[in-house]
């Protein structure tokens, strides 16, 4: 990879990291029960802000958006709202909620604020001979090392994905490198996949068996509020 290509790749990763965040669900005992990824979407000026993620494993209620803000020695999280979950074996695999802005505002402690990038462009149809990709940070949990809080993170990403085939609801992308082990992608379902200009076409939902392609749910074929 040339220096120019490295700069372009880093620029794309930085762009996707601004858009993509983690969505988590804990049970009443404080145990993490599910984790996915997602992004915020606003169709028009008068439309609600939606949280979009994968349908599989998304509880209708009780999920939170992870942030990198630390409050009282814990990673702060905001309510993700009540999800409409669309998931069935015929390829439907997405969920969305309306971001509960009033609830979030009322739950913030004095001096706390959160800023998220909201995607406002139309979703595009993935095409052949184009490069696609996604990027999300894993593991925001802060741990104490002495008197210091440390966030052990790693970057889950795939660059230079190529559209191999397309169905009514699913895009199949071929990575430019061998598909990683399952643990690498754990919690990445729902990550937006975009072209080099940041135009989102679909969300990651899993892989194929055998491990040849990454499956993504198409967003250009659905209607959202």
Image: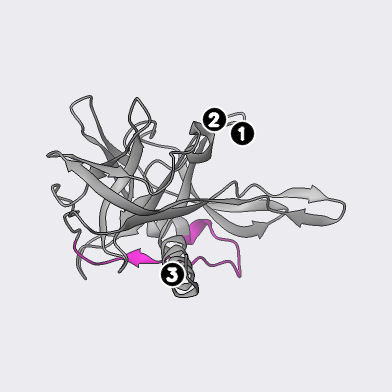
* Position of residue 193 in the picture relative to residue 46 (left or right): right
Dot 2 alpha-carbon crowd within 10 angstroms: few under 14, some 14 to 19, many 20 or more:
few
The residue that disc 2 covers is 27
Please tell me whether residue 107 belongs to the stretch shown in magenta: yes
Q: Which quadrant holds residue 48? A: bottom left
**Which span of residues is magenta-colored?**
105-122
* Position of residue 133 in the picture relative to residue 219 (left or right): right
Name the residue rendered at 46%, 61% in the picture: 17
Q: Secondary structure at mark 2?
A: loop
Give the mark nearest the N terminus, 3 or 1. Answer: 3
Q: Residue furthest bottom?
A: 4
Name the residue rendered at 43%, 70% in the picture: 5
- The answer to whether the residue labelled 3 contacts the one labelled 2, judged by CB atoms less than 8 Å apart, is no
Dot 3 alpha-carbon crowd within 10 angstroms: few under 14, some 14 to 19, many 20 or more:
few
**Residue 99 can be seen, yes or no:** no
* Position of residue 168 in the picture relative to residue 214 (left or right): left
- The answer to whether the residue labelled 2 contacts the one labelled 1, judged by CB atoms less than 8 Å apart, is yes
The residue that disc 3 covers is 5
Name the residue rendered at 79%, 49% in the picture: 144
The x and y percentages for residue 204 are 34, 43
The residue that disc 1 covers is 30
The x and y percentages for residue 206 are 36, 35
Q: CA distance from mark 2 to mark 1?
A: 5 Å
Dot 1 alpha-carbon crowd within 10 angstroms: few under 14, some 14 to 19, many 20 or more:
few
């Amino acid at each position: 990879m040339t220096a120019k290509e490295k700069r372009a790749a880093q620029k794309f990763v930085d762009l996707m990291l601004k858009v993509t965040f983690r969505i988590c669900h804990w049970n009443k005992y404080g145990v993490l029960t599910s984790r996915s990824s997602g992004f915020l979407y606003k169709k028009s000026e008068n439309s609600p802000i939606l949280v979009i993620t994968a349908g599989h494993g998304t509880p209708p209620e009780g999920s939170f958006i992870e942030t990198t803000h630390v409050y009282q020695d814990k990673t702060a999280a905001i309510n993700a709202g009540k999800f409409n979950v669309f998931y069935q074996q015929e390829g439907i695999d997405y969920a969305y909620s309306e971001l509960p802005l009033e609830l979030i505002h009322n739950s913030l402690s004095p001096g706390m604020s959160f800023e998220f990038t909201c995607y406002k462009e139309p979703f595009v149809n993935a095409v052949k001979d184009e490069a696609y990709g996604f990027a999300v940070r894993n593991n925001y949990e802060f741990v104490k090392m002495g008197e210091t809080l440390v966030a052990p993170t790693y970057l889950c990403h795939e660059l230079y994905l190529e559209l191999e085939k397309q169905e009514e609801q699913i895009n199949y992308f071929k990575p430019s490198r061998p598909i990683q082990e399952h643990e690498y992608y754990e919690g990445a379902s729902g990550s937006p996949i975009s072209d080099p200009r940041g135009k989102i076409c679909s969300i990651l939902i899993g892989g194929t068996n055998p491990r040849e392609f990454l499956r993504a749910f198409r967003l250009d074929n659905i209607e959202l509020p």
